[in-house]
Image (cartoon, helix red, strand yellow):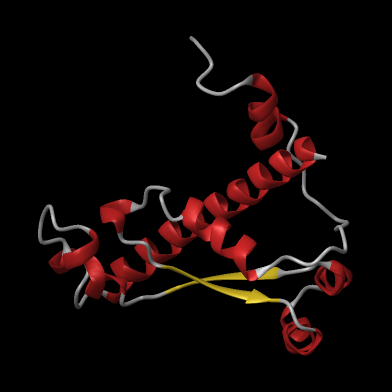
Amino acid sequence: MTNPIPTNIQEQLFTQARTVHAFESHPISDEQISQLYELMKWGPTAFNAQPGRYVFVRSEAAKERLLPALSPGNVAQVKSASVTVIVAYDTHFYEHLPSLYPAMDAKPFFEGKPAVTEVAALRNSSLQGAYLLLAAVSYTHLRAHET
């Protein structure tokens, strides 16, 4: 099989990827966050439902409000990171399906079915969180090669 992307990119995204415990202290701009979102939003979800919702936590005050929700092992990481992203989901994502997935009327698959909707929202927003992570890693890779 021919590699669809260069081996060094595959390594950066998958085979050499590891959990990060230390972060650079440079700020992440609104423009950079927008660029990440613009890239990751193209990742596929079922029916193009796009249930993920994101909160970008950057200020010290916002981080302090977040700390009680964290496991103790993540507190120092959140405090030191330029931005922490909360990946959440909208359980009423199906309301947007007529415009997001006009190929068919998919809304009846979810409307009035909270258990189905919850599972679909969780699964697809988790995928979207992974897409955001991969987008961030790809930008890190590009930045490393610009210097």
Q: Nearer the viewer, residue 69 or 82?
A: 82
Indicate the position of residue 86 as horizontal and vertical percent values.
61, 72
Q: Quadrant of residue 3?
A: top right
Percent across and percent down for residue 50 are 37, 62
Vertically, is 55 above or below 68? above
Residue drawn at 25 percent across, 71 percent down: 96
Q: Position of residue 111 (x, y in %)?
A: 19, 74
Q: Between residues 86 and 33, which one lies in front from this camera angle?
A: 33
Establish if 12 lies above or below 125.
Answer: above
Question: Closer to the camera, 105 or 73?
Answer: 105
Query: Which residue reaches farthest top?
Result: 1
Give the residue drawn at x 66%, y 46%. 139
Residue 38 placement (x, y as % from top left): 48, 57
**Quadrant including the C terminus:** top right
Left or right of residue 18: residue 133: left
Residue 80 shown left or right of residue 65 in the figure:
right
